Amino acid sequence: MRTALVICGALGREVKDIVDRRGWDVDIHGLSAMLHLYPSRIVDELRDKLESLQPRYDRMVVVYGDCGTAGRLDPLLDHFGASRVRGPHCYEMFAGEAEFERLMEACPGTFFLTDWLVRNFERAVIRGLGLDRHPDLKSMLFANYESLIYLRQLPNPRLMEKAEAIGAYLGLPLEIRDVGTGELESRLAELIQV
Protein backbone atom coordinates (compact mmCIF):
# COMPACT_ATOMS: atom_id res chain seq x y z
CA MET A 1 0.00 0.00 0.00
CA ARG A 2 1.51 3.34 -1.03
CA THR A 3 1.15 5.98 1.68
CA ALA A 4 1.65 9.72 1.41
CA LEU A 5 2.19 11.91 4.45
CA VAL A 6 1.20 15.49 3.76
CA ILE A 7 2.79 17.53 6.50
CA CYS A 8 2.97 21.05 7.82
CA GLY A 9 6.48 22.36 7.27
CA ALA A 10 6.67 23.29 10.97
CA LEU A 11 6.63 19.56 11.76
CA GLY A 12 9.03 18.49 9.04
CA ARG A 13 12.06 17.59 11.15
CA GLU A 14 10.05 15.76 13.77
CA VAL A 15 7.98 13.78 11.26
CA LYS A 16 11.07 12.81 9.24
CA ASP A 17 12.77 11.65 12.44
CA ILE A 18 9.73 9.58 13.45
CA VAL A 19 9.46 8.02 9.98
CA ASP A 20 13.18 7.19 9.88
CA ARG A 21 13.28 5.71 13.40
CA ARG A 22 10.22 3.57 12.79
CA GLY A 23 11.28 2.53 9.31
CA TRP A 24 7.92 3.41 7.75
CA ASP A 25 7.67 3.11 3.98
CA VAL A 26 5.93 6.41 3.27
CA ASP A 27 6.50 9.40 1.02
CA ILE A 28 6.57 12.80 2.72
CA HIS A 29 5.09 15.85 1.01
CA GLY A 30 5.24 19.19 2.79
CA LEU A 31 3.31 22.43 2.76
CA SER A 32 4.83 25.69 3.92
CA ALA A 33 4.54 26.43 7.62
CA MET A 34 4.10 30.07 6.65
CA LEU A 35 0.53 29.23 5.59
CA HIS A 36 -0.37 29.65 9.26
CA LEU A 37 -0.28 33.40 8.67
CA TYR A 38 -3.31 32.86 6.39
CA PRO A 39 -5.21 29.82 7.74
CA SER A 40 -7.76 29.79 4.92
CA ARG A 41 -4.87 29.18 2.52
CA ILE A 42 -4.02 25.97 4.41
CA VAL A 43 -7.29 24.48 3.16
CA ASP A 44 -6.73 25.67 -0.42
CA GLU A 45 -3.12 24.45 -0.58
CA LEU A 46 -4.03 21.15 1.03
CA ARG A 47 -6.88 20.63 -1.45
CA ASP A 48 -4.47 21.16 -4.36
CA LYS A 49 -1.86 18.84 -2.82
CA LEU A 50 -4.34 16.02 -2.10
CA GLU A 51 -5.82 16.33 -5.56
CA SER A 52 -2.38 15.96 -7.15
CA LEU A 53 -1.40 13.02 -4.92
CA GLN A 54 -4.64 11.04 -4.91
CA PRO A 55 -4.04 9.12 -8.15
CA ARG A 56 -0.63 7.86 -6.97
CA TYR A 57 -1.40 6.77 -3.39
CA ASP A 58 -3.66 4.23 -1.72
CA ARG A 59 -3.63 6.17 1.53
CA MET A 60 -3.04 9.82 2.44
CA VAL A 61 -2.35 10.94 5.99
CA VAL A 62 -2.34 14.65 6.80
CA VAL A 63 -0.11 15.84 9.63
CA TYR A 64 -1.83 19.07 10.58
CA GLY A 65 -3.94 20.25 13.45
CA ASP A 66 -7.04 22.30 12.70
CA CYS A 67 -4.61 25.26 12.80
CA GLY A 68 -7.15 28.07 12.67
CA THR A 69 -9.09 26.67 9.71
CA ALA A 70 -12.34 26.76 11.73
CA GLY A 71 -13.16 23.10 11.10
CA ARG A 72 -12.74 23.29 7.32
CA LEU A 73 -9.99 20.63 7.15
CA ASP A 74 -11.97 17.55 8.13
CA PRO A 75 -14.70 17.86 5.43
CA LEU A 76 -11.92 18.32 2.86
CA LEU A 77 -10.14 15.21 4.12
CA ASP A 78 -13.40 13.24 4.03
CA HIS A 79 -13.82 14.26 0.38
CA PHE A 80 -10.41 12.78 -0.48
CA GLY A 81 -10.64 9.79 1.87
CA ALA A 82 -7.62 11.10 3.78
CA SER A 83 -7.06 10.93 7.53
CA ARG A 84 -5.56 13.51 9.86
CA VAL A 85 -3.51 13.35 13.02
CA ARG A 86 -5.93 14.37 15.75
CA GLY A 87 -5.46 17.60 17.64
CA PRO A 88 -6.15 21.31 17.29
CA HIS A 89 -2.51 22.32 16.65
CA CYS A 90 1.07 21.22 17.14
CA TYR A 91 1.38 22.83 20.59
CA GLU A 92 -1.27 20.45 21.92
CA MET A 93 0.29 17.52 20.04
CA PHE A 94 3.74 18.23 21.48
CA ALA A 95 2.58 18.97 25.04
CA GLY A 96 0.02 16.16 25.05
CA GLU A 97 -3.70 16.65 25.47
CA ALA A 98 -3.90 16.50 29.27
CA GLU A 99 -0.80 18.64 29.84
CA PHE A 100 -1.88 21.25 27.28
CA GLU A 101 -5.29 21.54 28.95
CA ARG A 102 -3.59 21.95 32.33
CA LEU A 103 -1.26 24.64 30.98
CA MET A 104 -4.12 26.56 29.39
CA GLU A 105 -6.23 26.30 32.52
CA ALA A 106 -3.34 27.61 34.64
CA CYS A 107 -2.59 30.51 32.28
CA PRO A 108 -4.81 31.06 29.23
CA GLY A 109 -2.55 33.94 28.17
CA THR A 110 0.39 31.71 27.22
CA PHE A 111 2.39 32.11 24.03
CA PHE A 112 3.94 28.82 22.93
CA LEU A 113 7.17 28.14 21.08
CA THR A 114 8.41 24.97 19.39
CA ASP A 115 11.84 24.29 17.94
CA TRP A 116 10.54 25.36 14.52
CA LEU A 117 9.09 28.62 15.82
CA VAL A 118 12.25 29.46 17.74
CA ARG A 119 14.34 28.86 14.61
CA ASN A 120 11.94 30.89 12.47
CA PHE A 121 10.63 33.56 14.85
CA GLU A 122 12.19 36.43 12.90
CA ARG A 123 10.74 35.26 9.59
CA ALA A 124 7.37 33.94 10.81
CA VAL A 125 6.49 36.43 13.54
CA ILE A 126 8.56 39.59 13.19
CA ARG A 127 8.51 39.85 9.39
CA GLY A 128 5.45 37.65 8.89
CA LEU A 129 3.25 39.87 11.04
CA GLY A 130 4.92 43.06 9.83
CA LEU A 131 6.48 43.94 13.18
CA ASP A 132 9.71 44.88 11.43
CA ARG A 133 7.83 47.59 9.50
CA HIS A 134 5.29 48.47 12.17
CA PRO A 135 6.85 47.87 15.61
CA ASP A 136 3.90 49.64 17.24
CA LEU A 137 1.81 46.54 16.48
CA LYS A 138 3.81 44.49 18.99
CA SER A 139 1.91 45.79 22.02
CA MET A 140 -1.42 45.28 20.28
CA LEU A 141 -0.60 41.69 19.25
CA PHE A 142 1.08 40.54 22.46
CA ALA A 143 -0.44 42.69 25.21
CA ASN A 144 -2.65 39.93 26.58
CA TYR A 145 0.05 37.28 26.86
CA GLU A 146 1.29 36.58 30.38
CA SER A 147 3.76 33.74 29.90
CA LEU A 148 5.98 32.08 27.33
CA ILE A 149 6.40 28.31 27.23
CA TYR A 150 8.95 26.69 24.97
CA LEU A 151 7.78 23.16 24.17
CA ARG A 152 11.26 21.97 23.29
CA GLN A 153 11.74 18.99 21.00
CA LEU A 154 15.52 18.70 21.42
CA PRO A 155 17.87 20.58 23.74
CA ASN A 156 20.05 22.90 21.67
CA PRO A 157 22.15 25.74 23.16
CA ARG A 158 21.71 27.94 20.08
CA LEU A 159 17.93 27.58 20.16
CA MET A 160 17.95 28.19 23.91
CA GLU A 161 19.68 31.54 23.34
CA LYS A 162 17.13 32.42 20.68
CA ALA A 163 14.24 31.44 22.97
CA GLU A 164 15.64 33.67 25.71
CA ALA A 165 15.91 36.53 23.21
CA ILE A 166 12.29 35.96 22.17
CA GLY A 167 11.24 36.11 25.82
CA ALA A 168 13.11 39.39 26.22
CA TYR A 169 11.56 40.77 23.02
CA LEU A 170 8.05 39.84 24.19
CA GLY A 171 8.75 40.89 27.77
CA LEU A 172 7.52 37.52 29.02
CA PRO A 173 9.04 35.05 31.48
CA LEU A 174 10.31 31.98 29.62
CA GLU A 175 9.58 28.46 30.79
CA ILE A 176 11.11 25.40 29.13
CA ARG A 177 9.27 22.10 28.82
CA ASP A 178 11.22 19.22 27.28
CA VAL A 179 8.48 17.36 25.42
CA GLY A 180 10.23 15.68 22.48
CA THR A 181 7.61 14.68 19.95
CA GLY A 182 4.98 14.42 22.68
CA GLU A 183 1.84 12.72 21.43
CA LEU A 184 2.57 13.51 17.77
CA GLU A 185 4.40 10.20 17.32
CA SER A 186 1.77 7.99 18.92
CA ARG A 187 -1.05 9.74 17.06
CA LEU A 188 0.78 9.37 13.78
CA ALA A 189 1.51 5.71 14.54
CA GLU A 190 -2.24 5.12 15.06
CA LEU A 191 -2.78 6.11 11.43
CA ILE A 192 0.26 4.52 9.80
CA GLN A 193 0.39 1.18 11.58
CA VAL A 194 -3.12 -0.01 10.70
Image: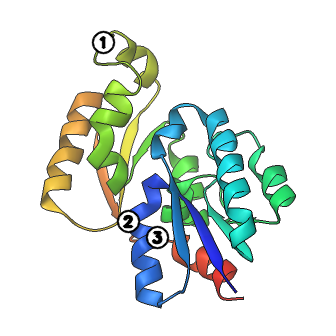
Q: Circle 2 — which element?
A: helix
- Mark seen at residue 15: 3
Is residue 171 visible from the viewing direction of this image?
no
Along the line of sight, which residue is nearer the eye, 186 or 61? 61
Amino acid at pointer 1:
Arg
Q: Which mark is residue 13?
A: 2
Residue 27: x and y in percent read 54, 74
> Which of pointers 1 and 3 lies earlier in the amino acid sequence?
3
The reply, left or right, for residue 92 in relation to residue 22 is right
Q: Measured from the top left, where is residue 68 in percent x and y?
A: 64, 39
What residue is shown at x 55% (from left), y 63% (from top)? 93
Q: Which mark is residue 133?
A: 1
Circles 2 and 1, Cβ within 8 Å, touching? The answer is no
Mark 1 element type: loop
What residue sits 37% from the left and 31% below the top?
Answer: 125
Three-letter code, disc 2: Arg
Structural crowding at the residue carrying mark 3, measured as other residues with C-alpha within 10 Å and reported as few (<14), some (14–19) or many (≥20): many
User: Measuring 86% from the left and 56% from the top, which residue is drawn there?
Assistant: 79
Give the amino acid type for the residue marked by disc 3 in the picture. Answer: Val
Compared across the picture, whether 107 is left or right of 73 comes to left
The N terminus lies in which quarter of the figure? bottom right
| Whether residue 137 is visible | yes
